[in-house]
Amino acid sequence: MPSAVLLTLLAWALFLALCAGGLWWLYRRPPQVTLHRSVAPAGRSGQTLPLEVRAEISARWPTRVILLDPVPRGLISSHALQLGGLLYGESCHTLTADLSLMRRGIYNWDTATLRWADPLGLFWHSAQLTVPLQVAVYPESHGLFLPELLRPLLSEGQWARDHGLSDPLSLRGVRPYVLGDPLRQIHWPLSARALSLPTGAAVPVVREPEKMASSSVTLYLDTSGTEVYLESAVRLVASLAAQAWADGLAVALATSAGTSTPLGRGPQARRALLTALAGLTPDYSPPALRPPRTGTNLLVVTQQAPPALVRQTLEARVTASRAALIALPEGFYLEPGERPRKQWIGVPDTVRALEQQAGVLAERGVLAFVLRGNQSVLRLHR
């Protein structure tokens, strides 16, 4: 009798083992899954983009399926991108969410995870699905008006005389004062000489500067600084570029890491520049500022203002219409709306040397701005 019971148990064990082996064999291969993500390829930091994930699943047998599609770190989905259930045959599933872009960067969203099992859930398998997608998160920009002295100017003949911007460095002549003329344009030596004439024969005279047509902006970003500096510098460069485009100017970007973008004002040039800014990381290569396009306005952003970069900026001034060197010694500045904060340390020796040389540099056509951590970026407007 015991032998019969034992044989029965062995038979059942063998039967169950065969069933389990059959289940494992039938479900060793994954169901066919096609995954599609629909989202804008780029957006600004802090922006929210609509996201749609569509999964087409084909299962030959009743199958338990779990599909996980986690977003890259630095992006946040409004809810988990996950679906699952007991599926059979062909089915289509759609998930929608809001994708929040938290940090600047280039994010490669390449994989998703598929888990599947038999209907009893005895044997679970896992596989990675390759679904390449790249999302560029552009840096934030803030309100900023290009200072008049930072506007690029390039002479273009008679048209510029009539329609261009006033260039305070180029004197076209003088004329009698007219009510409403800015007092800063009065030519005091000539006015004093005229006032010495008999009463009634003298009126003040004002300078009449040349009119110059706008050209382009070349932005050079020194990436050899701290991570805090790079984030602030990237936002400053993005803001300068945005304002230059708003003024109808063509913009190009170059960095000490070797990145460069084509000069332009159209959508393609804008995407190239913002994508380059999105992917920047600290790089401590020596500065390599190449001579910019003739007539462009050169803006150099740096943290330490190394002597080599100052020298290269002076050399670039030969072809640039104007040049400005903006140093951020603490690595950050007060953006519009931020409250002042105390600074407990002094500027580096290289930045102190830049401040001491500011007058000499200005005479050679290079404006030097030192923007401390407790100073507003609007200080550049002056």
Image (cartoon, helix red, strand yellow):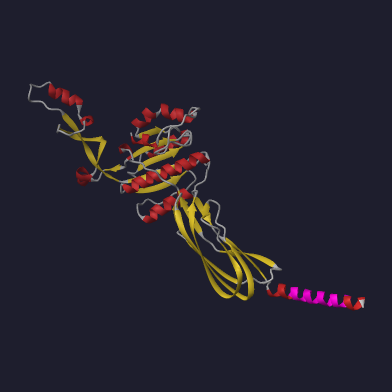
Percent across and percent down for residue 100 are 48, 53
Name the residue rendered at 42%, 42% in the picture: 236
**Horizontal relation, residue 131 to residue 3: left or right:** left
| Numbered marks: total | 0
Vertical placement of residue 205 versus 24, above or below: above
Quarter occupied by the N terminus: bottom right
The question of residue 10 being in magenta is answered with yes
| Quadrant that contains the C terminus | top left
| Residue 375 as seen in the image, left or right of residue 87 | left
Residue range in magenta is 6-21
Residue drawn 40% across the image and 28% down it: 357
Asked whether residue 249 appears in the rendered view, the answer is: no
> Is residue 26 something one can see in this rendering?
yes
Instruction: Kindly give the residue lying farthest to the front in the view shown.
Output: 1
Residue at 13% x, 24% y is 194
Is residue 144 rendered to the left or right of residue 128? left
Which of 316 and 195 lies nearest the eye of the viewer?
195
Question: Residue 66: horizontal and vertical position, in percent?
Answer: 61, 65
Q: Please state the horizontal and vertical placement of residue 234, each as a whole percent of the image.
A: 45, 44
Depth check, front residue: 378 or 2: 2
At x 48%, y 47%, the residue is 258
Q: Position of residue 114 (x, y in %)?
A: 61, 65
Q: Is residue 159 magenta?
A: no
Question: Quadrant of residue 359 in the image?
Answer: top left
Camera-nearest residue between 259 and 336: 336
Does residue 78 lie above or below 190 as drawn? below
Instruction: Name the chief secondary structure element in magenta.
Output: helix
Q: Is residue 51 above or below residue 149?
A: below
